[in-house]
Image (spheres, rainbow, N blue to C red):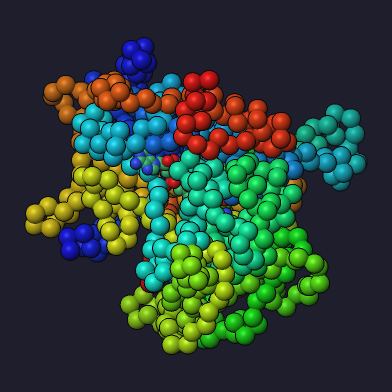
Amino acid sequence: MGQLLLHGWKLISRGFSSLTPHPLRVCIVGSGPAGFYTAEKMLKALDGAEVDILDRLPTPFGLVRSGVAPDHPETKLSHLPETWKQIVVNQFSRVAANERCSFFGNVNLGTTVSLSDLCKMYDAVVLAYGAESDRYLGVPGEDLGGIYSAREFVWWYNGHPDCSNVSPDLKNTDTAVVLGQGNVALDVARILLRPINELETTDIAEHALTSLRESTIRKVYLVGRRGPVQAACTAKELREILGIKDLHVCIQKADLLTSAADEEELKKGRIQRRVYELFSKAATSHQQHDIVGQRELHFMFFRKPDRFLPSESGNTVSGVRLEKTCLKENGASGKQVAVGTGQFEDLKCGLVLKSVGYKSVPVDGLPFDEYRGVVPNMKGRVLSLDQAEHAIVEKGLYVTGWLKRGPTGIIATNLYCAEETVASILEDFKNGLLTPSSGSPKPGRQGLLQVLENKNARFVPFSGWEKIDTKERMEGELRNKPRKKITTWEELLLAVDG
Amino acid sequence: MVLSRFSQLGARFLKESGIGQFWVTRRGCVKWPSSHYLYPTKSLSFSTAVTGKAQEESSEQKEKITVTFVDKDGEEKVIQVPMGMSMLEAAHENDIELEGACEGSLACSTCHVIVMDMEYYNKLEDPADEENDMLDLAFGLTETSRLGCQVIAKPELDGMRLALPAATRNFAVDGFVPKPH
Ligand SMILES: Cc1cc2nc3c(=O)[nH]c(=O)nc-3n(C[C@H](O)[C@H](O)[C@H](O)COP(=O)(O)OP(=O)(O)OC[C@H]3O[C@@H](n4cnc5c(N)ncnc54)[C@H](O)[C@@H]3O)c2cc1C
Ligand SMILES: NC(=O)c1ccc[n+]([C@@H]2O[C@H](COP(=O)([O-])OP(=O)(O)OC[C@H]3O[C@@H](n4cnc5c(N)ncnc54)[C@H](OP(=O)(O)O)[C@@H]3O)[C@@H](O)[C@H]2O)c1
Ligand code: FES
């Protein structure tokens, strides 16, 4: 480590760095796309920057590992040597291999280290820890067994160590209801509906594969509170699910009728137009519907959940009561919102996946907008309110990714988001706001190592992750899949030792 | 109540700060894989009247086209692009600021370019569904937008001008606009 630091000293000869006597020490919390793009841009922009990336997991890459559906990297283009997911992982791994960058896995902001610890140790702290909670529906029965958030279900099939025990029962029912019609809803529905042999060669968690193999689910309802014009999914993902082999897709033609306001939305929105076209095509295309045990996908529009219905035992869900809706223009936003009509219908099911959006969680000492679930910021600079309720900039504290913008956008969106935050850091640095001219420089990495040692906290360096990676790939090879994910905390940490 | 005021504040700051008025001049430390597109140069109908050295020279010339990239400040860079090479790859070889985060695997739209003349736009084959899917998510989409990784140099494109989208990156993509609840 001493050597690493020395190296940092030697690198401060060019660019902005010559203005300061020591390197700019940056700590990024979260190693998802937002964190890694920030690191990449920071290292590139400033020769004298030293970047440490913390993650609470022993494994890096955030939702690239634990969110992106296992059957997604399968869509490999023939002229490219790798899948896009691997391309992203390789890019991030090259960032981690930079000698001015270090990865500290198994370090949780909030428990292992506090925000005030980090602010004391680093010139700049960038929070990129994503959105690891869920939007709540707030309707009766939401806590019944058999109801999961899409986040939990996704973490379960992607082998996130926090959800290896989720074990949803896929054998007690033939019907699952997915609430929401965004891309995540489409992901979870697709995993439930895809022929099992198409999942066997992916890196889906072994426990999920076993469960899905025995699954009795044949019907999946994707329920949206608004219409096909407002569906939150994008064309690529919609086409993908509509294209599942031997799938019977049901869309009520009446739902496709459009109002003047809908037409206006379609005119303005290219995404909506293309999604709507796909729905229309699917509703009218002739489909074979006589295959034994055929799987069915039902798109239900204009329905919002009113309550969850308990089974006889009272502990698990047996259905969802839906209220029919109609669309009303919301004066303030000009958007069409769903309004209940007072008509209800019950939909029987044994599994419910709520896919109505992710939500970030605050940590101690961090300004947080509870309503929007994001950290208030100006171009990535964290804002707080002073006693007179004036917004003030929290010096040296930045935010990026889903924690900054809310839980929307694809991986690449975080690249622009990181670019903006890094530009703010550079500007503040240039204006001398990050490195005081007098006083001793902040300890950076050395300080972090000290805190971890004092707390007897064991961190996982990038080389530790590489051991996990190698083990997973080796075990995957035996099963003809890209990797066999290690899915529990104990085994992950054991693999680091191994 | 203190917290709920943040939303308003945020909106005001966004307005005042005119988000995204920068253009970071850099390339990520992403190594670009060498060309995987092999263009069937033989099938090109070059003039057959010339022979010997002259023919060699002319076909060498014709194996490249001239493309002009115009950045958001209006600055132009004229480059020679070998047949069969994508505009993304060509941009990278010439230090032009075009991202290309997914390295041409149609998973990002960060290689968005705008074809400046309709005439040239019409010479391109229509975008495939997969390209359209990604164009859906591109910032500042225009009628003549394409993905740089999908535009491959061919003789008819000689003289094409491509604009890099202005940096009005306001994240108004993929549902960022707050939704009604
Ligand atoms: C189910 C799903 C599927 C998706 N599929 C795709 C897709 O196919 N293609 C695509 O382009 N986009 C996809 N996306 C979107 C994409 O994943 C996100 O845009 C992106 O991951 C957000 O990046 P982030 O870095 O802000 O958050 P994340 O990727 O969530 O990264 C956050 C990181 O912070 C860490 N962390 C959390 N809390 C702490 C803490 N207290 N201390 C330390 N570390 C912490 C986490 O472990 C994690 O590694 C998908 C999203 C979801 C939810
Ligand atoms: N392959 C990919 O590229 C990929 C895959 C997965 C995810 N992602 C991205 O990740 C982001 C998150 O995806 P997401 O699906 O979680 O979010 P999302 O796109 O915002 O979708 C949320 C869905 O929940 C509905 N909803 C919200 N609150 C509700 C309520 N109270 N009652 C009923 N329905 C409600 C929304 O309907 P309303 O529209 O009516 O609000 C919408 O259908 C998106 O930007 C997505 O594109 C991308
Ligand atoms: S480089 Fe990603 S779509 Fe072109």
- For the question of whether residue A111 can be seen, the reply is yes
- For the question of whether residue B82 can be seen, the reply is no
- In the picture shown, does residue B68 fall above or below A124? below
- In the picture shown, does residue A168 fall above or below B25? below
Residue drawn at point x = 62 percent, y = 36 percent: A484
Relative horizontal placement of residue A463, taking residue A365 as reference (left or right): right
Residue drawn at point x = 90 percent, y = 41 percent: B48
Residue drawn at point x = 50 percent, y = 50 percent: A166
> Splitting the image into 4 quarters, where does residue A419 fall?
top left
Residue B63 x %, y %: 76, 38
Relative horizontal placement of residue A206, taking residue A309 as reference (left or right): right
Q: Nearer the viewer, residue B173 or A346?
A: A346
- In the picture shown, does residue A42 fall above or below A496? below
> Splitting the image into 4 quarters, where does residue A373 fall?
bottom left
Residue A473 x %, y %: 63, 30
Residue A139 x %, y %: 39, 71
Relative horizontal placement of residue A455, taking residue A161 as reference (left or right): left
Residue drawn at point x = 85 percent, y = 28 percent: B53
> Splitting the image into 4 quarters, where does residue A108 fall?
top left
Relative horizontal placement of residue A282, taking residue B72 as reference (left or right): right
**Can you name the residue that lies furthest to the left here?**
A388
